[in-house]
Image (cartoon, coloured by chain):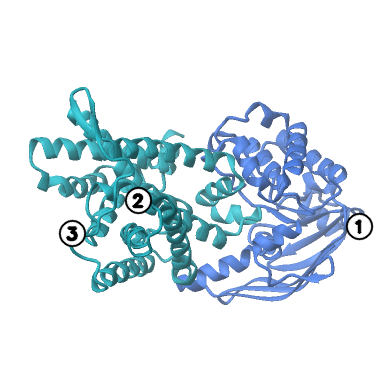
């Protein structure tokens, strides 16, 4: 469905992504794991096209020079030059790191803004589904986004992304800073979204352990390179992965 | 009593000046220094259609709104989009366009006292012993309607919600499929239309003169800074604050101090509370 080949991204002379190739099939959850600054967010921005906007703004302001190479294929079509709004229109929706909800709008308005691409019946149906998935949001409809807790904001961010009718949803560090209970709720919700809406999901995270149970396939990024990849079972059996990402030392 | 009535009318006029400016700034962070020029330009467009082309008044008004909207959108699409995100360049570019329009009009012969637009409804009435003409009452009524329509538009329509999303976080809006360049053009079009609407409502109260462009720009900026840049409802409330301050000054000090009030309001706000009285982003930070 979505396939990136040989992605290279430079911020000025700093190599952020080094020849990264990933792919995600229909109706699959793909995990991308790596430490801080491994390139997870850059990868997500590149897939969603936000990097083009960053490149444009930086060039205008005379700031960092951002260079990109490689190809991104989505449903067989080369999309690496499409701007973010067009990619979103094709169904690639990014739910960004640190959530970036609209802090001055209420919960329901956030969701309505998210439904910009949806037709009226689609929006209505998805809204009902989001409230079913996250009943908390239903009770907080009138609450201003900025006053929600971190977990509530994350649910809102995912709900808002779903309103945009994704065919492939990119979740960038959805568990960042959340309690273990909230983490497991969100992870179950992610699996349910994949099953129920029949969409593909790419999820990035620093810690593999909470996310691993739901992924079908995963990549491990280190310093901008994809160093390892495999199905869930392959990675779970790999002793290096076990010690580095699960904290399980083999004796 | 006359302070109350004329203060309200003046305040609504200020709000009408400022709403277009506030809308453009709120959505695309562009300080549109051509706002005053668009205001005067639309006055002359209406005058030309009415007198040179002989069109009916209502047709001229509708056409002027549309034409000014298109001119604003084109200014954005062809010039300002290239300096997007660089505040100083945006100010210089938009001010240059404003100057070109205003001085171009002056050079083209639009000066003197014979450029006037007729009132919609002639005559006047008495409110509590004070004579108020119908045009001024109409300004208040339409001004209130514009604020109400704007509120509904930005809270319940797809485009309006997208504009508000972009005003809050442009990149997050992009991720949801909202085309930021297109929305900025749309916002500039609507903002210019609001400038034209203000011109059509307020110019019948006086002459259409080029100099009004500079005053309108300063007043619009004063209202937006006092209200908190980017906050639309803040602009409306600030318009009332400055509007009444101006009328009080006129009554107790003299009419020549009217512009001083606006400039003084800018300076005072920047010293005491730079985010403005209703700067929403700051408000949230202060509350949390």
Placement of B80 over or under A116, stated as above or below: below
Name the one closer to the observer, B28 or B215.
Answer: B215
- The residue beneath circle 2 is B200
- The residue beneath circle 1 is A234
Q: Badge 2 local density, few (<14 within 10 Å), some, or many (20+)?
A: many
Distance between the Cα atoms at labels 3 and 2? 17 Å
Placement of B236 over or under A225, stated as above or below: above
Query: Residue at coordinates 52% horizontally, 67% vertically from top-left?
Result: A57
Answer with the quarter of the image where residue B75 lies: bottom left
Which of label 2 and label 1 is nearer to you? 2
Question: Could you tell me which secondary element the residue under label 3 belongs to?
Answer: loop
Query: Residue extending furthest top?
Result: B128
Q: Which mark is residue B273?
A: none
Question: Could you tell me which secondary element the residue under label 1 belongs to?
Answer: helix
Placement of B106 over or under A181, stated as above or below: below
Which of label 1 and label 3 is nearer to you? 3
Q: Position of residue A64 (x, y in %)?
A: 51, 72
Query: Residue at coordinates 26% horizontally, 50% vertically from top-left?
Result: B219
Distance between the Cα atoms at labels 2 and 1? 72 Å
**Image mark 3: chain:** B
Query: Residue at coordinates 85% horizontally, 62% vertically from top-left?
Result: A1
Query: Residue at coordinates 43% horizontally, 41% vertically from top-left?
Result: B146
Q: Earlier in the sequence, mark 3 or mark 2?
A: 3
Q: Quadrant of the N terminus of chain B?
A: top left
Say whether residue B265 is left or right of residue A175.
Answer: left
- The residue beneath circle 3 is B113
Give the colour chain B carries in the figure: cyan
Answer with the quarter of the image where residue A181 lies: top right
Question: Could you tell me which secondary element the residue under label 2 belongs to?
Answer: helix
Say whether residue B249 is left or right of residue B215.
Answer: left
């Amino acid at each position: 469905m979505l396939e990136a080949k040989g992605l290279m991204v430079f911020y000025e002379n700093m190599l952020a992504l080094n020849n990264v190739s990933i792919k995600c099939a229909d109706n699959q959850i793909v995990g991308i794991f790596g430490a801080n600054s491994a390139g997870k967010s850059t990868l997500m921005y590149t897939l969603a096209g936000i990097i083009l906007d960053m490149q444009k703004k930086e060039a205008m302001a005379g700031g960092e020079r951002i260079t990109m190479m490689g190809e991104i294929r989505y449903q067989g079509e080369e999309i690496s030059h499409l701007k973010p709004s067009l990619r979103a229109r094709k169904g690639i929706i990014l739910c960004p790191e640190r959530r970036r909800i609209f802090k001055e709008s209420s919960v329901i308005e956030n969701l309505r803004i998210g439904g910009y691409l949806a037709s009226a019946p689609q929006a209505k149906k998805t809204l009902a589904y989001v409230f079913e998935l996250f009943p908390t949001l239903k009770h907080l409809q009138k609450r201003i986004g900025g006053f929600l807790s971190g977990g509530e904001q994350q649910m809102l961010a995912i709900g808002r992304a779903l309103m945009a009718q994704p065919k492939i949803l990119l979740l960038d560090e959805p568990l960042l800073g959340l309690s273990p209970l909230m983490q497991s709720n969100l992870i179950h919700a992610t699996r349910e979204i994949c099953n129920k809406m029949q969409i593909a999901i790419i999820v990035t995270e620093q810690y593999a352990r909470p996310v691993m149970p739901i992924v079908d396939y995963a990549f491990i990024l280190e310093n901008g390179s994809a160093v390892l990849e495999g199905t869930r079972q392959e990675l779970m059996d790999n002793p290096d992965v076990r010690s580095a990402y699960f904290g399980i030392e083999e004796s | 009593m006359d302070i109350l009535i004329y203060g309200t009318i003046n305040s609504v006029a200020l709000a009408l000046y400022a709403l277009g400016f506030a809308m453009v700034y709120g959505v695309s962070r562009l300080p549109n220094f051509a706002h005053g020029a668009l205001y005067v330009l639309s006055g002359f467009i209406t005058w030309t259609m009415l007198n040179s082309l002989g069109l009916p008044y209502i047709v001229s008004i509708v056409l002027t709104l549309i034409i000014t909207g298109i001119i604003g959108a084109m200014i954005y699409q062809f010039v300002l989009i290239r300096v997007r995100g660089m505040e100083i360049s945006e100010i210089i570019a938009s001010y240059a366009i404003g100057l070109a329009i205003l001085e171009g009009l002056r050079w083209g012969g639009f000066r003197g006292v014979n450029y006037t637009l007729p009132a919609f409804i002639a005559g006047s009435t008495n409110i509590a012993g004070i004579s108020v003409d119908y045009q001024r009452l109409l300004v208040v009524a339409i001004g209130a309607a514009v604020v109400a329509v704007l509120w509904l538009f930005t809270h319940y329509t797809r485009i309006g919600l997208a504009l508000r999303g972009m005003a809050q976080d442009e990149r997050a809006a992009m991720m949801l499929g909202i085309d930021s360049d297109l929305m900025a053009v749309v916002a500039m079009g609507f903002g210019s239309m609001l400038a034209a609407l203000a011109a059509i409502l307020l110019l019948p109260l006086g002459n259409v003169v080029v100099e009004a462009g500079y005053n309108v720009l300063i007043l619009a900026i004063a209202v937006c800074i006092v209200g908190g840049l980017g906050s639309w409802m803040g602009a409306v409330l600030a318009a009332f604050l400055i509007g009444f301050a101006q009328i009080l000054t006129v009554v107790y000090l003299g009419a020549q101090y009217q512009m001083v009030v606006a400039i003084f309001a800018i300076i005072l706000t920047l010293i005491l509370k730079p985010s403005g009285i209703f700067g929403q982003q700051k408000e949230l930070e202060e509350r949390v």
